[in-house]
Amino acid sequence: MAISTQATLLRRMIRPQGDPVADNPLTSSRAVRLALTKAAHESIGLVLTVTSVAEAEGTLDETLAALDDDLLLVELLRRDGLVGLAAIDQELRTAIVEMQTIGALIPKPAVERRPTATDAFLSLPLLQAFLGAFPATVVGTSLDGWGDDVLADAKIPDLRTAGLMLADVRFRTVQMSVDFGVADRQGVLQIVLPVIEIPVGQGLPKPSPVDWHSALQDSVMEAPAGLRALLHRVTLPLAALRRLKVGDVLPLTGCTVSSVRLLAADGQTVAQAKLGQMGGMRALRLEPPPAPQLTELDAGSPPPESEMLLPETETLEGWSIADDTKDVSDDTALEADQMPEETLSPDLDIGFATMAMDDLPDD
């Protein structure tokens, strides 16, 4: 084996650089050889050569009838369910045991004996390594997807028990004959798994056309948008603000139930609203914006600062806090038991934003 490898390397080194390299496509047979050779060496240090790879298909009875009675049978699971089996002959399982016990192969044929649960347990590292490398190695070949997500598990007592445990479907058997290079010892590994049925003429479904304009608009319209109701903005001295406690009442001079504004997250006014109640809850009824008031201005004089014109009816006043020191601004709300009550009819077709309240007297 060493002489053959050295000769191959020498041929590659002395080949002229201009010679084209032969295109050797990866076949299923070559992929299986690579997977088993690599798995045996990396898992238990067993150096072997895969001399041949054969495939066969058949029913469950035909598949089991082709197996010998003295083989070591190991369960193959997929998603915790039994789907197939691995069959290891006497020479291969003996080589596996020797590599994991004494670290080398004995240069004489294996002694005939019945397979045991210990043989199955010692064979798991090689089987797991092979089954783990198999799916990636056979991508693009006829075995692509056949061995995906398969794990080796416990020993199966015999072929009769295997026939009772496995489903009655068509199976594919991949048989790999290996040579250990010691005393003409050769072994066999067989993997038995169900055939993957691919419907003929049935391709992937065509994707339905998407109206990206409508889809984007629907996504934007479903985005959350928060509103904040502002009844009044009051300016307080810092000293008075620090002395506030639970139960204090703030004056809302010039504020009415129609002074509510709905503000967006950026502080922009979205709508004008009127405060009331509905079903025992605080409610806001959307109102049309107030009509602009036109006033005559003297020529050359700058226009006054714009301000919101509030209705003169239902003014909320009569509360006071003194001591002027430093002005600060704060958003304040009326206490439920101090606010005038306005009953909103439940049959209005205008949207309401509701808040819990104790009582509001009728308008």
Image: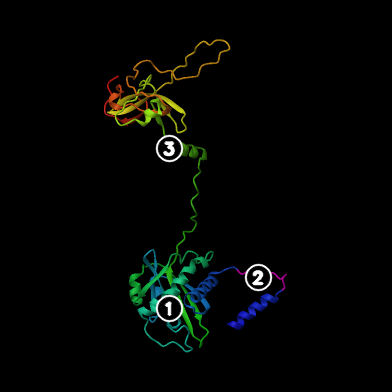
Q: Which residue is mark 3?
A: 224
Q: Position of residue 184 (x, y in %)?
A: 51, 87
Identify which amino acid the numbered label 1 is placed on.
Ile
Residue 22 bears which disc, if any?
2
From the image, tell me which residue sits under label 1: 88
- Considering the numbered disc 3 on the image, is that residue within a helix, a strand or a loop? loop
Magenta part of the protein: which range? 16-24
Residue 152 falls in which quadrant of the image?
A: bottom left
Q: Quadrant of the C terminus?
A: top left
Q: Eyeballing the image, is 164 above or below 343?
A: below
Q: Is 148 located above or below residue 312 in the figure?
A: below
User: On the rendered structure, is 49 left or right of 64?
Assistant: right
**Rendered residue at 46%/79% (across/down):** 188
Task: State left or right for residue 22 relative to residue 69.
Answer: right
Q: Is residue 354 above or below residue 19?
A: above
Give the CA distance from mark 3 to mark 1.
63 Å
Q: Secondary structure at mark 1?
A: strand
Residue 217 appears in the picture as rendered: yes
Which residue type does callout 3 highlight? Pro
On-image quarter of the N terminus:
bottom right
Q: Nearer the viewer, residue 319 or 331?
A: 319
- The x, y position of residue 93, in whole percent, is 43, 81
The crowding category of the residue bearing disc 2, from other C-alpha atoms within 10 Å (few below 14, some 14 to 19, many at least 20), is few
